[in-house]
Amino acid sequence: MEVRFLGHACFELIDGDTTVLIDPFLTGNPKAAIAAEDAAATTIVLTHGHADHVGDVSAIAKRTGAPVVAITELAGELGEEGLDVRDPNMGGTVKFDWGWVKIVPAWHTSTTPKGTYNTPAGVLINFQDTVVYHLGDTCVFSDLQLVGKRAPIDVALMCIGGHYTMDRVDAVDAAELVGAKTVIPCHYNTFPPIETDAQAFKSDVESATRSNVAILEPGESHTP
Ligand code: NI
Ligand code: MN
């Protein structure tokens, strides 16, 4: 399988014809690697309701027929638009033929483009036996260390841009708590308030923890 970065917090987990698409913000994303019309998805997973995460979910889900996994209230809102949704809450797991998605905490806020409030999350995904943890938007908090107790984390997709999330310094502590084999930074350099030095994050993580950091440009992939 491969983990492909599509810009900002959007990733694809790909294995043959199976594609799990996470936080598909492509239209209006200055760093988007592809157009929304070209996105493939057999399942879509959302961390929270902010526009830079739900993005093109409706158009892509309607075009592909992919089910959308999101926390209960966000899933409910998308279900009213006619999308095929799965609506777990914190700690809940949804199973697919390719693996499973578990909803875990994140410390952030969440308002959808329609103005409704809901709870933000991270997502732990077992994709063809590779465990990927997308932290969503979050600050550092001690319970990050609990997520990997369910399954050792191969790849952590981690926000480092600051301002709306933890910055690259706090993210070093987050990397230590998560304990993934590989950390892929995201949610930085998309807009001026979240510009940061990913190379400095990489060297700090690799000197302070046992994790490796893979910096991906939009469109690039990592194979665990
Ligand atoms: Ni957000
Ligand atoms: Mn965000």
Image: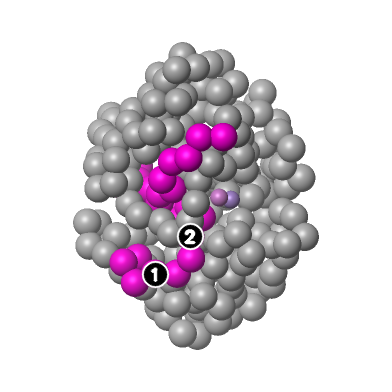
State if disc 2 and disc 1 touch (CB < 8 Å): yes
Dot 2 corresponds to which residue? 138
Q: Which residue occupies 35% across, 65% down?
A: 144
The answer to which of 220 and 140 lies nearer the viewer is: 140
Quarter of the figure with the C terminus:
bottom left
* Other residues around mark 2 within 10 Å, as few (<14) / some (14–19) / many (≥20): many
Look at the picture and state if 41 lies above or below 82.
Answer: below
**Residue 200 belongs to magenta span:** no
Residue 13 in sight in this render: no
Q: Which mark is residue 141?
A: 1
Instruction: Indicate the quadrant where residue 114 lies.
Output: top right
Q: Residue at x 62, y 43 (%)?
A: 52
Whole-percent x, y for residue 113 in the image: 60, 34
Find the magenta span and give its range: 115-144
Amino acid on which the number 2 mark rests in the picture: Thr
Q: Position of residue 153 (x, y in %)?
A: 33, 60
How far apart in space, not on screen, are marks 1 and 2 (Cα)?
8 Å
Whether residue 205 appears in this view of the structure is yes
The answer as to whether callout 1 falls within 8 Å of ligand 1 is no
Which residue occupies 45% across, 17% down? 80
Residue drawn 48% across the image and 40% down it: 117
- Vertical side of 212 occupied by 26: above or below: above
Q: Residues within 10 Å of mark 1 (few under 14, many from 20)?
A: some
Figure quadrant of residue 102: top left
Instruction: Check the image and report above or below for 154 versus 172.
Output: above
- Name the residue type under label 1: Phe
